[in-house]
Image (spheres, rainbow, N blue to C red):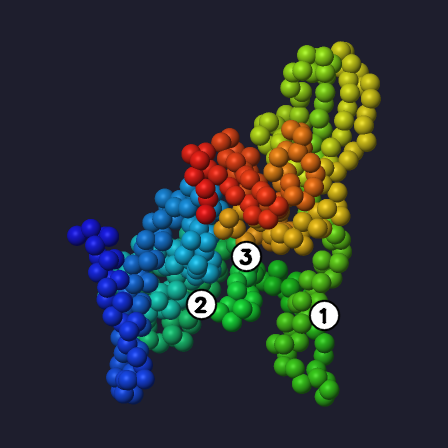
């Protein structure tokens, strides 16, 4: 049966479910329906995770210029990117653990349990993870989430202590919670953990009778204070910008040929990359004679002055590429009509783009249009990225 037919039938069933009025249900029926609907949702989550992982492997979303399948799902499906990444991760671990996959699809274990099991995966330890599948599955079927988390943590700790296998890289995850707050989850080596803990304690206010805050709240305030101090030392121009040396030889001036474009570290670079770098950079002019002698050196100047960049940060508040949510600190100022082609350096001709999407719009065939308010991006085939 075609997948389209199956999803259509599913939609018809959901149409009936959404018409149920909870006020008309008795408490026993309410409890039964809560568990039944949740179980079916978990089964659908299993199907979605399998599709999400397969889409990730195939690069679904790249046709829209998305940085990843998770970013594409966030934009097109309205998902939190962290949830999309978790689905992809669960799909990947289910490919490795078929019994877990089957139990999830049959409604025997919850989505939450599979997410916990997925956290057990450590690079280089897939064989050991497969050997622990039965133990994890037993705890998941018993709905013993506390025991499952403990077993997963124990597995990860044993994996790290095995000197024969590579240890996990340090990791830090920052995500938005359902209530609009920010959640942090990190995993650091003992040395790095000592550094972070020492800094937190140094900035944490001691308890006092006048301060009823728990230690966790005082430590959270310390983390914010550390970040504020770090940002204060960065100044306004926190994002490094490219410096392009444009070396103009005599033949270029007299015959109109394209001059050399050398980066500070890379030497000659591709002309498309040159145009991208020239959007937001410092430009120096060096005029040489026919034998290579330097005739004149112009002063370095910024293509986008600092005050104008600050105005862009206030207006755009991050990357303007459709579907992207990268913050302004990750972005370059992009000239929609390049200044080398006569485009003015004014706000109506500038937008913030993250590094990835700045590359995208400078690829051959891609076109960006900006009317001062909305940015439209057209693919090489003429279709618009939505």
Q: Nearer the viewer, residue 148 or 74?
A: 74
Q: Nearer the viewer, residue 155 or 208?
A: 208
Q: Is residue 63 above or below residue 42?
A: above
Task: Find out whether the residues at labels 1 and 2 contact each other: C-beta distance under 8 Å.
Answer: no
Query: What residue is rendered at 72% in x and 59% in y?
Result: 230
Residue 359, picture quadrant? top right
Query: What residue is rendered at 44% in x and 51% in y?
Result: 72
Give the residue number, with chain letter if any, for mark 2: 153
Residue 243, picture quadrant? top right
Give the residue number, with chain letter if any, for mark 3: 170
For mark 3, does the 10 Å Cα neighbourhood hold few (<14), some (14 to 19), or many (20 or more) residues? few
Sequence-wise, the earlier of marks 1 and 3 is 3
Residue 55 can be seen, yes or no: yes
Using the numbered discs, state the Cα–Cα distance from disc 3 to disc 2 in whole angstroms: 15 Å
Tag in front: 1 or 2: 1
Q: Is residue 237 above or below residue 122?
A: above
Residue extending farthest to the front is 371
Sequence-wise, the earlier of marks 3 and 2 is 2
Using the numbered discs, state the Cα–Cα distance from disc 1 to disc 3 in whole angstroms: 23 Å
Query: Residue 343: x, y in percent?
Result: 66, 34
For mark 1, does the 10 Å Cα neighbourhood hold few (<14), some (14 to 19), or many (20 or more) residues? some
Q: Is residue 237 above or below residue 300?
A: below
Query: What residue is rendered at 25% in x and 70% in y?
Result: 16
Give the residue number, with chain letter if any, for mark 1: 203
Using the numbered discs, state the Cα–Cα distance from disc 1 to disc 2 in whole angstroms: 29 Å
Residue 45, picture quadrant? bottom left
Query: Residue 265: x, y in percent?
Result: 67, 32
Query: Residue 83: x, y in percent?
Result: 43, 61
- Asked whether, in this view, residue 18 is left or right of residue 150, the answer is left
Query: Residue 314: x, y in percent?
Result: 67, 54
């Amino acid at each position: 049966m075609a997948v389209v037919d199956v999803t259509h039938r599913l939609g018809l069933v959901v149409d009936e479910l959404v018409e149920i009025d909870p006020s008309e249900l008795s408490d026993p029926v309410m409890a039964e329906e809560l568990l039944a609907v949740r179980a079916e949702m978990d089964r659908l989550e299993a199907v979605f995770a399998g599709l999400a992982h397969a889409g990730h492997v195939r690069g679904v979303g790249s046709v829209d210029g998305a940085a990843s399948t998770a970013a594409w799902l966030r934009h097109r499906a309205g998902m939190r990117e962290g949830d999309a990444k978790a689905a992809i991760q669960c799909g990947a671990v289910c490919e490795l653990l078929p019994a877990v996959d089957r139990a999830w699809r049959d409604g025997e274990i919850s989505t939450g349990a599979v997410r916990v099991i997925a956290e057990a995966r450590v690079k280089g330890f897939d064989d050991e993870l497969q050997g622990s599948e039965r133990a994890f599955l037993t705890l998941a079927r018993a709905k013993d989430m506390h025991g499952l988390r403990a077993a997963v943590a124990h597995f990860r700790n044993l994996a790290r202590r095995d000197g024969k296998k590579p240890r996990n890289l340090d990791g830090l995850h920052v995500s938005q919670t359902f209530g609009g707050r920010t959640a942090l989850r990190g995993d650091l080596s003992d040395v790095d953990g000592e550094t972070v803990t020492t800094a937190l304690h140094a900035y944490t206010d001691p308890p006092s009778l006048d301060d009823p805050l728990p230690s966790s709240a005082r430590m959270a305030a310390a983390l914010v204070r550390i970040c504020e101090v770090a940002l204060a030392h960065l100044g306004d121009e926190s994002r490094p910008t490219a410096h392009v040396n444009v070396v103009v030889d005599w033949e270029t001036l007299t015959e109109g040929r394209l001059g050399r474009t050398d980066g500070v570290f890379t030497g000659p670079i591709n002309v498309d990359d040159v145009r991208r770098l020239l959007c937001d950079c410092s430009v120096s002019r060096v005029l040489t004679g026919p034998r290579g002698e330097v005739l004149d050196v112009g002063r370095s100047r910024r293509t986008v002055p600092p005050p104008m960049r600050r105005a862009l940060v206030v207006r755009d508040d991050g990357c303007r590429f459709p579907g992207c949510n990268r913050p302004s600190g990750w972005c370059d100022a992009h000239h929609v009509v390049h200044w080398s082609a006569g485009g003015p350096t004014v706000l109506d001709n500038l937008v913030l783009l993250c590094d990835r999407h700045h590359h995208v719009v400078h690829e051959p065939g891609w076109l960006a249009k900006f009317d001062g308010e909305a940015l439209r991006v057209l693919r090489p085939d003429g279709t618009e990225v939505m």
